[in-house]
Image (cartoon, grey):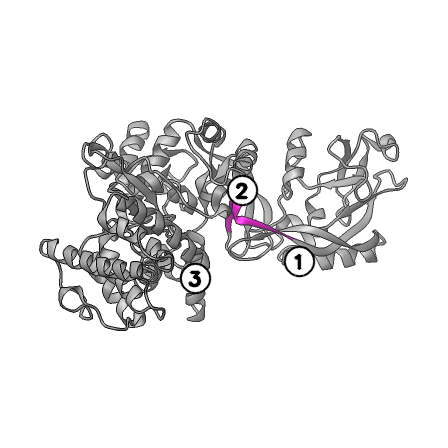
Amino acid sequence: SGMGPGRSALACSPAAVLVVPLLLLHGGMLPRAAALLRTSRSPLSPVGSRCSRMLRAAATQADRSTPAAPPRPSFVGEAGAMDKYFDFATKEAELYTWWEALELFKPTGQGKAGSKKPYVIPMPPPNVTGYLHMGHALFVALQDILARFHRMRGEPTLWLPGTDHAGIATQLLVERALAAEGVSRSDLGREGFLSRVWEWKAEKGGYITSQMRRLGASADWSRERFTLEDGMSEAVIEAFVRLHEQGLIYKGDYMVNWSPNLQTAVSDLEVEYSEEVGKLYVFKYELADGSGHVPVATTRPETILGDTAVCVHPEDDRYSGLIGGKVKVPLTGREVPIIADEYVDREFGTGALKITPAHDPNDYSLGKKHSLPFINIMNRDGSINENGGAYEGMDRFDCRERLWADMDAAGLTIKVEPHTQRVPRSQRGGEVIEPLISSQWFLKADGMAKQALDAVESKQVRIIPERFEKTWEQWLSNIHDWCISRQLWWGHRIPVWYVNGGSEYVVARTEADAYVQAREAHGEDVSLTQDDDVLDTWFSSGLWPFSTVGWPANEGKDGTDLQNFYPATVLETGYDILFFWVA
């Protein structure tokens, strides 16, 4: 390492080396390492004894040389001597507090202006709702090793910690707590509910960071950030405004993954698919002229109420003579066309597909292609709306059973058989996701995806292990525009204001700026209403490597953390969030 304590560690016995690389990568760790060596049940070899003496000497030297050093822990005796037996359960917290007071985890040197290049690790921010699990323990250990190693080498090392506001997860927890009191968020109103969430955060939000301290994480806690604090919120608003100005953020009506329980859209990445045994329902689509029927199969009979076509393969001899004709939607009498498209798999089911453009992603594409009507049959809570006729107000799954029973009574059913299918479920709530067309905010992803692909291909960014480069490429090469709006209250509220209660809007950094824009365009007598939605949590945490070091406030300023510690050096993370966060 080029430092005395480091060389001492490497000279220790093999048994000691198992301990030292994890603990002895900064002078502040020396007392603990010495204690561990002293309390070993096995006699130390001559090399080990020499190492132990050197550790104690180095700790004493560090204590003497630190200006205005805080008091040593009570269990550390004179000249660095320690208790014969080290009781980690009671001593480690006191020892860690000592290290923090000595500011041992802050980067030393002058950042990029110094002689050595900074080494920067942005800590993937755990959810503020969370408690440590094995995955957290693993990332703390790995990142701690990296930070201590490069700190030992004399590099200005910043391991930057913080927590994420976790929009869906946090709101869900607080709503559950309110429900136990017999209160809903709508009872409190937006401001009242947010006040309760901040109270909850103040009470419980520090658990996970205190646990990381307890693990001995040598992060610079003086720079700890939270994604909803003022400076971080400023970064989120600035990013949204700039991206909108560049034409990369837009509002539109598209199909999204809808969580009926949470009553919000969720991203593709927040949907988990599970293999489940369900049912395949085969039924009759009667020809409009009464001459027969087309057998059709579905796994969701309730969506029949929103069908606007039946689709067959153009080369399927069974149905080629029916293309262009009409069939009747069961129980409704509504007539829809029989269309042809090569998308249809002739070997699956009956070879004839019901098309529900408003409730299936594939049907949505076919509906656009063939200019079919889009009939939404569901409310935001998953119940059937007025387009469901006699089934209005029923839960979607109750409707499934009732509709099938009514079709059976009408002689329109053929059979029901077991069928294994991939069921989309909400990662947070666990309920079955409903594809719905909704007005949302989207971020164009193709341009940024290309930059990310080029960065890895050119080795500007390296992914280790390299096998995940293929995963990276597959995801970013097939990416869709990102739905960034969420129908929640806890989060960064979208910086958009609607003019006079209409659909026209202005995008601004503050409400005052929004009024300036609106009055220039519509005169002084104008009213504005801010968009109710918040941004996807991943929108804010995606800015983490640079927002945490002072972007945008410190753009172009010398001597700031933004200049000294961005871009970061390494991002250690779980492969399961390679899509969520890293990409």
Q: For the residue carrying disc 2, how many other residues have a C-alpha within 10 Å: few (<14), some (14-19), or many (20+)?
A: some
Question: Relative to 67, does residue 365 appear above or below in the rendering?
Answer: above
The quarter in which the N terminus is drawn is: top left
- Residue 236 magenta-highlighted: no
Q: Which mark is residue 173?
A: 3
Q: Residue at x 53, y 39 (%)?
A: 468
- Residue 270 magenta-highlighted: yes
Between 85 and 312, the one lying in front of the other is 85
Q: Residue at x 62, y 57 (%)?
A: 393
User: Quadrant location of residue 158?
Assistant: top left
Residue 401 location (% of width, % of height) = 72, 59
Between 209 and 447, the one lying in front of the other is 209
Residue to which mark 1 is pinned: 397
Q: Residue at x 37, y 49 (%)?
A: 143
Q: Amino acid at mark 1?
A: Phe
Residue to which mark 2 is pinned: 438
Magenta residue span: 264-274
Q: SS for tag 3? A: helix
Instruction: Estimate the spatial distance between the alpha carbons at disc 2 and disc 1, rounded to whole Å.
Output: 21 Å
Q: SS for tag 1? A: helix
Instruction: Estimate the spatial distance between the alpha carbons at disc 2 and disc 3, rounded to whole Å.
Output: 25 Å
Q: Earlier in the sequence, mark 2 or mark 1?
A: 1
Q: Amino acid at mark 2?
A: Ser
Question: Relative to 346, does residue 9 appear above or below in the rendering?
Answer: below
Q: Earlier in the sequence, mark 2 or mark 3?
A: 3
Between 165 and 461, the one lying in front of the other is 461
